Image (spheres, rainbow, N blue to C red):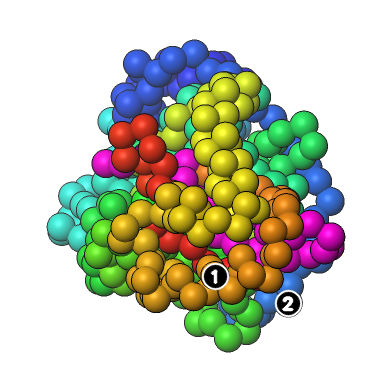
Amino acid sequence: MNPRSLFHHIRRAPWCAALLCAALACAPASGVTRHKKKEKPAPHHRTTAMAPLARDGETEARLLDVYKLIGAGQMREALAHAESLVHDHPNFQLAQLVYGDLLAARTRPVRGVGDVQETAGPTGAQSLADLREESLLRIRALRERPPAGAVPSQFLQLAPRSKHAIAVDASRARLYLFENTPTGLKLLGDYYISVGKLGIEKASEGDLRTPLGVYYVTSNLDPKTLKDFYGVGALPINYPNPYDARRGKTGGGIWLHGTPPAQFSRAPKATDGCVVLANPDLDRIIRTVEVRSTPVVIAPSLKWVAPQQLEAEGKPFSDTLGAWRAAKASGDLNRLLGFYAPDFSANGKPLADWLPQVRAELGRAHGRDVQLKDVSYLRWTDSADTMVVTFGEVPEGERTGPVKRQYWLRTGNQWKIFFEGVIG
C-alpha cells in the first residue's frame, strides 16, 4: 500500500480528518518492505478461547485498507471490508469502532471517528480517546517510515551470533524486528505496541512505566504455564540491567507479551510496564528470535542512521576495546586496571574483591594473546554515554572461552568499565 496515497485519500474524507491531525506535518515517507523468511516451528500454544492467528501485520493492513476506501468515498466497499475484519477479529476494538461509524454513516452524518453518544461516562470516554490515539499512531507509523536501509543508532556492531535484533520506539508505539545478515541489519517487520500506563523511563517497582535502555531476551516462557492474560507467550528481558542497577532502579518482570482473548490490541499506554503486542505479531517474534543473544533496545524515539555512519562512530570505541584486549593479553595487572572505574562491580563484588579473580585469569593465560570473538557493542545515551559489550574471550591456542558482557561509561574522553560478568 502506498503511504502517500493512503494519506491523500483519507484527508479527503471529513469524518476521517481526526485520524490524521498528527500526521499533517510529517516528512515524506520512505517505503520499507516487510520481508518473509523461514521461521522456526511455533511452540505449542494454549487453545483456550484463542482466535486463529493471522499473519503478522495482516490485521493492521486490513484496517488501513478500510481507511483508504473511506477516504476514496467508497463507503459501501469500506463497510464490507470492515464487516469482514470484525467478523474475523471480533476482539479488535478499533476495527469495531470504525465499523460502527460506517454503519452509523448510513443513517446520519458522522462528525468524527468514534462518533457515539457521550453516555458511557468517564470510563467510556477514556476508552474512546485511547482508540482514537491508537488509530493515529497506526497511521503515523505507516506515514513516517524509516529511511530505506537505515538502522537505529544504538546498533553499532552486532556479532553473527545475534541473528536478530529488536528496537522499540515509544513515541510511535512501534516495535521493529531486524535480521542480522552478512550485509547488515535488514528490517523484517514493524508492529504496534503498548507501553506502561504512566509512560516510559521506569525507575522503581510498581511505577507503571516501561524501562528505557539496552536489554537482552533472557528466556521464552512456555505459554502453557501462563495465564490467558499474556496471550500466546512472553519473552522476558533483563531489566534491571547493570546500568539500571548502578542508578538505583528497581523492579522487574518486564516482558514482551501478547494480549488476552478479549483484546486484539491494548491502548497505547495500558500495561504495568511490559511491552505488549497483538498475538499474531508476538507469535512471529517468538518464532523468530533467539534467547540470550537477541538485543532489545527501548528508546523514547529512535534515531535512524546509515550503516556507514555507525561504522565511523564506532571506530573510537573499537580502538579502546582493542587496547583493553592488549592490556589483558600483556598480563600486566596495573595496565589492565587502568580500564576499570573505581566504583566497578562484578555481580555485586567491588573492584577490590574482584582482583583475585583477575589475577587468576592472568595466571592461567601465561602471557598468551587473547582474542575477542563474536563482538557486539550497543550504544545507549541519556544523561551519559554507555556501551553494552558482549564477546567471547579466547586465549591463544584454545578453541573456546567464556562469553562476557561489559558495561562501559564515558567520562570526558575516556571509557571505563563499571561492570563485567560471564554470561556463558
- Residue displayed at 42% across by 50% down: 338
Say the numbered circle drawn on residue 44: 2
What are the residue bounds of the magenta stretch?
Answer: 379-405
| 224 in the magenta segment | no
Q: Nearer the viewer, mark 1 or mark 2?
A: 1
Does residue 224 appear in this view? yes
The percent coordinates of residue 325 (x first, y second) are: 61, 48
Residue 388 lies, with reference to residue 366, above or below; the image says above
Observer-nearest residue: 146 or 154?
154
Report the number of discs: 2
* Residue at which label 1 appears: 359
Q: Residue furthest left?
A: 122
Instruction: Please state if 121 lies on the left or on the right of 349 as rendered.
Output: left
Observer-nearest residue: 313 or 412?
412
Question: Which structural element holds mark 1?
Answer: helix
Q: Residue furthest bottom?
A: 225
Does residue 272 appear in this view? no
Q: Residues within 10 Å of mark 2 (few under 14, many from 20)?
A: few
Question: Which structural element holds mark 2?
Answer: loop
Q: Amino acid at mark 2?
A: His
- Residue displayed at 35% across by 16% down: 25
Label located before the other in sequence (1 or 2): 2
- Whole-number angstrom distance, CA of label 1 to CA of label 2: 47 Å
Instruction: Please state if 275 lies on the left or on the right of 271 as rendered.
Output: right
